[in-house]
Amino acid sequence: MGGEDMTAECYVITGKQRLAGAIRVSGAKNSSLPLMAAALLAEGNSVLWDIPDLADITQMRQVLENLGCRVYLHKDGSWQINAGTVSGFEVDERLMRSMRASNLILGPLVARCGQARIALPGGCAIGSRPMDQHLKGLRDMGVEIKESHGFIEAYAARLQGADIYLDVPSVGATENLMMAAVLARGTTFIHNAAREPEIVDLQNFLNKMGARVRGAGLDVIRIDGVECVHPAEHTVIPDRIEAGTHMVAAVMTQGDIELENVIPEHLEPVIAKLRQIGAMVQVEDDRVRVWHRGTIHPVDIKTMPYPGFPTDMQPQFMSLLSCAEGTSVITETIFENRFQHVDELRRMGANIKAEGRVAVIRGTEKLEGSFVETTDLRAGAALFLAALSAEDVTVLEKVTHIDRGYENLLEKYQALGAKVKRVAHGQA
Ligand code: EPZ
């Protein structure tokens, strides 16, 4: 990935560098993954543009190749996915357990091939990550599901349209069930559907393939099943979480960053909070500029399903609020264990007390460089941001977690003036 030495697992970051300049936001990881899975529905070659070069994308490519697809990065920069020759219906357990989003092939695969076998994705650092809503909806559509020995087996000669009511607005379950319903006989309604922008992006790609999906972005999605769909071409939406991360970097380093390739409406909850904190945010068509000087005001944050404040921005805001003048409260309502970054931030001098899903952050004047460890993708991003604003030098270990969700992070930040380098473990 980017030619970097993959044994290099640490960032060495010299703090207190004001970041300034412009960077282009990459395509969205959390849209790319379902779009790649959706290509399974059609015989032939689908073309996806602006897919980011990330470890998770490489994993999804391996899953699709494992199923008999031909997947390659064309010299023009597009990803070409030929699912004409889907020969398998089982996903390698190692691949499944290393990336939860591999479960997104379940719906399209059982719809296309009539069967699928995947390992139950293990839990991860931020929570148990069950799949009960995915399976509930598939059963509603007549899929026979067997769970045994840590595997899920799904069988259906032809899925039937159904009225599905999700107990929680699960992003992955909504995506899996949308894709499964595309080839079902009859009409499917998904009630209490997730409303994230990535769901809308998936609807747009599916409809380009000849599917009939309506309502994405609202809480009821209607899918009128069709006999078959054809390959299509699509450009993935920009990554709103990458963009939000860079916006926090501008505020934490008292800098001035202009982001290119953003959809501002996807960032509304983040922009509102940054303005509440005292940052300046200038919004244009597909660009956002963020700059800040002086005090960071404390704010309270409660993560919610879209269009609420995104859980994937919670760790980054905890770093930011660790430097606020006053006390903030963060409530994490989506995942039961998404405060792994708290202990590491404390090692940098942050004053945070977390009980269950609530963290109380008493802002401190400065953070101190330290040795800290990345436990998961967004926790790593939070610690990276904290290190950029801290006194002295920070060694951030296990940065391969960050490689999963941020394309060319080092290059982008070096171009903004950050003093950061990547070294092998133990050489820092
Ligand atoms: C997607 O995960 C994202 N990943 C996550 O981003 C994001 O944090 C999450 O949505 C919430 O926005 C991708 O899109 C690849 P969920 P997903 O199903 O689909 C519970 C990142 O950092 N639930 O919406 O797995 C679940 O336990 C990642 O980029 C069930 O109870 O999330 C959680 O509490 C992290 N049963 C809540 O719903 C189910 O069957 C939200 O999970 C499914 C989920």
Image (cartoon, rainbow, N blue to C red):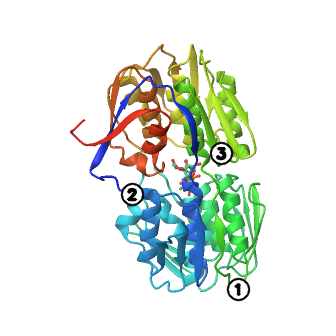
Which disc, if any, is residue 1?
2
The residue beneath circle 1 is: 227
Residue farthest to the left, as pictured: 426
Q: Residue 384's x, y, as percent? A: 43, 35
Q: Position of residue 358 (x, y in %)?
A: 54, 29
The residues tagged by marks 1 and 2 sit, at their Cα atoms, a distance apart of 39 Å
Q: Is residue 326 left or right of residue 278?
A: left
Depth check, front residue: 192 or 15: 15
Quarter in which the C terminus is drawn: top left
Check if mark 2's residue and mark 3's residue have beta carbons within 8 Å.
no
- Residue under circle 3? 305
The label nearer to you, 1 versus 2, is: 2
Residue at the image point whose x is 52% and y is 70% from the top: 105
Q: Going from the N terminus, do you reach mark 1 or mark 3 first?
A: 1
Location of residue 99 (image quadrant) = bottom left
Residue 242: x %, y % from top left:
55, 44
Neighbours of disc 2 within 10 Å: few (<14), some (14-19), many (20+): few
